[in-house]
Amino acid sequence: MRLFFTGGSGKAGRHVAPYLAAQGHQVTNADLVPLDHPDVTDLRVDLTAAGEVFSALAGLATMDELELDRQPSYDAVVHFAAVPAILRTPDVTTYATNVLSTFHVLEAATRLGIRKVVFASSETTYGVCFAQGERRPLYVPVDEEHPTVPEDAYATSKVANEVTARSVQQRTGADVYGLRINNVIEPHEYAEMFPPFLEDASLRRRNIFAYIDVRDLGQMVQRCLETDGLGYEVFNVANADMSVAATTDEVLARFYDGVEQRREMGRDETFYAIDKARELVGFAPEHSWRDVLDDPGRQPGR
C-alpha cells in the first residue's frame, strides 16, 4: 500500500513507520521533523494548516513517481501526529493542535477518496490517566464500552477526534479505525523503566497497569490495514499482560476494591481489555517485559 503516515518521527511513529515499510508498504512520513530512515520518505507538513494537508495528500511522494503516467493516490492514512501528552504545551495549544490536525487529515483523506484511515486515540480517554487526583474505572477489565470522561485537554482532544472520525465515517462510508493506545514502551525501556514498576505497582495505576510494546503496536496497525469493511471502530491497544509483577488478585484487592469485575481474568492478564482487537482484526501481541526481566512474583513451575 501507498501509505501517508503522520507523526512518523515521534516515539511510536519512529518504530511503526519503518515496521510498515518492512511489510512492503511505501511510507511517506508527514511530520515537522524528519525521521531520516532509509525506507521512509520524509515530507515536512504542518497538519494544522488545511492547505498543506490537502496538498501533501494529493501530491507525489518520491522522485520515482515522476515516471508514472498517472497521478498516484494514497491507499490509506495512518495518523499518529499529535502533541503527545499534557504539560508539553499550554492546554489550549494541545487541544487546538490535536483537534485541528485530526480534522484536517480526516477531511482531506476522505475528500480525496482514500477509503482507510487508522488514527491514534488514547488510553487517556477513559479519564483515569491524567485526572486531577485519583480516578478508578467503573468496571474492570476496561473495554471499549467504558464511558470516556476525561478532565484534561489532551484526553478531551482525543475524545473530540473520535467524534470527528465517527462523523466523517458516517458521511463517507470509509473505514476509520481509532486506536486507544496504552502507554507506549520501546524495547530498551524495559531494563530502564520497569524495575521500579515491579517493586511498586502503584506507579502504574494511571495506566490501568497496562502498556503496549511499540513492536506490537506496529502489528496492530498492520492488522487494521489488512482488515476492511468494519466502518467506524475503536480498539484498545495493549499487551496481553500487566506492566507490574503483582497478580490480578493483588491488584484487585489493593487498587480496585469495590470496582465491578465483569469476568474472570488470568493471573497476569491486562486490565485494559484487548478482546475486541483480537476478535475483529486478529491482533496477537507477541512481546512482554517478562521476555527481558525476571518476574519476581512468579512461582517455579507457573
Image: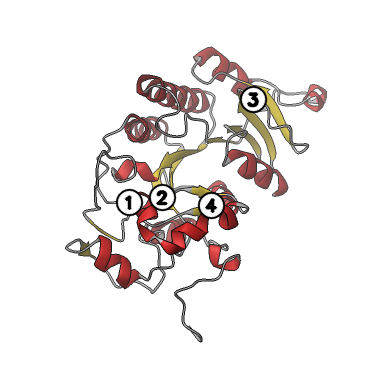
* Circles 4 and 3: CB atoms closer than 8 Å: no
Instruction: Determine the CA span between mark 3 and mark 2.
Output: 28 Å
Looking at the image, is mark 2 or mark 1 earlier in the sequence?
1
Instruction: Give yes or no for contact between labels 1 and 3 (Cβ–Cβ under 8 Å).
Output: no
* Residue 33: mark in rendering: 3
Around disc 1, counting alpha carbons within 10 Å, would you say few (fewer than 14), some (14 to 19), or many (20 or more)?
A: some
Please tell me whether mark 2 sits on a helix, a strand or a loop: strand
Image marks 2 and 1: residues in contact by CB distance under 8 Å: yes
> What is the spatial separation of the Cα atoms under label 1 and label 3, in whole angstroms?
33 Å
SS under mark 3: loop
Q: Are marks 4 and 2 in contact (CB under 8 Å)?
A: yes
Give the residue pinned by disc 4: 220
Which residue is rendered at x = 59% and y = 57% of the image? Answer: 191
Query: Quarter-wise, where is residue 140 in the image?
Result: bottom left
With 259 as the anchor, is 87 left or right in this view? Answer: right
- Which amino acid, by three-letter code, is at mark 2? Phe
Q: Which secondary structure lies at badge 1? A: loop
Q: Earlier in the sequence, mark 4 or mark 2?
A: 4
Q: Are marks 3 and 2 in contact (CB under 8 Å)?
A: no
Foreground residue, 62 or 192? 192
Horizontal relation, residue 263 to residue 289: left or right: left
When asked about the image quadrant of residue 122, the answer is top left
Q: Earlier in the sequence, mark 1 or mark 4?
A: 1
Above or below, 175 against 198 in this view is: above
Instruction: Provide the residue designation for mark 2.
Output: 235
**Percent x, y of residue 283:** 51, 59
The three-letter amino acid code for the residue at tag 3 is: Val
Q: Is residue 267 above or below residue 229?
A: below
- Residue with the mark numbered 1: 144
Q: Which mark is residue 165?
A: none
